[in-house]
Image (cartoon, grey):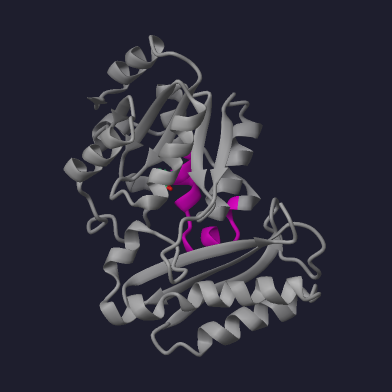
Amino acid sequence: MQTLSTNIAATDYVRSCPRPLGLVPTMGALHEGHLALVRRAREENATVVASIFVNPTQFGPQEDLATYPRDMERDLALLEAEGVNLVYAPSPEEVYPPGFDTWVEPGALAERLEGAVRPGHFRGVATVVTKLLNVVTPDRAYFGQKDGQQLAVIRQLARDLNLGVEVVAVPTVRDADGLALSSRNTYLTPEQRAAAPVIYRALSEAGNLWLGGEGNAATLRSAVRCILEAEPLIEAIDYVSVADATSLLELVRVDGPAMVSTAVRMGRTRLIDNMVVGGG
Ligand code: PAF
């Protein structure tokens, strides 16, 4: 496995790699969710590239950029064991050199849900993903369904800017108790970790109601909210959404693929999760 940290070296390396080439963009602190992306990429491509870059421009000023978990040595060992060909791990200066001032600004899709609570977040994501795609030139790029809105924004980015990459969605990986894996789960205290699967139970309740014939989106939202509000360790609920799975516009009735999603705060940790109901 090669590890490279400059744009030029990475672009040069991939030029001679067998195709198709799959890219798994990550911010490191890898867990089984990331490894599921890598395994899928390994199955579908002759060459697999993973990137590790904690992207400063997608963090707000009050967010956890400084404390975001980092463990390059462990990440490299995990990626090597999965048969990754190249790890591209640039420095912040390599990605954003002095004078950098061109941004990819996603549209309305990025203003809802996470975008409303984290202004500028998806501008940072869209900009760095575009740059990673330009450096690595993959045929396919792999993203987790766990960040459902990010996935929708990146799909639209690839389509709108003719990026020529197939965006592949990989299902969320959960712990046995239902908590979606996230690098930020390491921030949880043991008590918060024990309480956190309530998020999955709340989303599952919406799924079960829908399977039982309940199509009223407001009823599904209330059912999720009611379960979350009963957990004292949840200090705030940023949103509970039942939205069209593509446009992320809030629905009145669920009669096609819908994303039921939520973001909650437990102490210093913000957790997001979603579940798609109604097919798709
Ligand atoms: O999902 C992530 O880890 C990040 O948002 C991504 C896609 C690697 C961009 O920094």
Locate residue 31, reporting x and y percent: 33, 52
Locate residue 159, reporting x and y percent: 65, 33
Quadrant for residue 99, please give it: top left
Q: Does 123 lie within the magenta span?
A: yes
- Furthest residue toward left: 73
**Residue at image coords 33%, 57%:** 183
- Residues 36 and 5: in front is 36
- Residues 254 and 93: in front is 254
Q: Please say whether residue 119 is visible from this viewpoint.
A: yes
Q: Quadrant of the N terminus?
A: top left
Q: Is residue 24 left or right of residue 148?
A: left
Number of numbered discs: 0
Q: Is residue 218 left or right of residue 171?
A: right
Vertical arrangement, residue 49 with respect to residue 17, above or below: below
Vertical arrangement, residue 154 with respect to residue 165, above or below: below
Q: Does 27 lie within the magenta span?
A: no
Q: Which residues are magenta?
A: 110-127
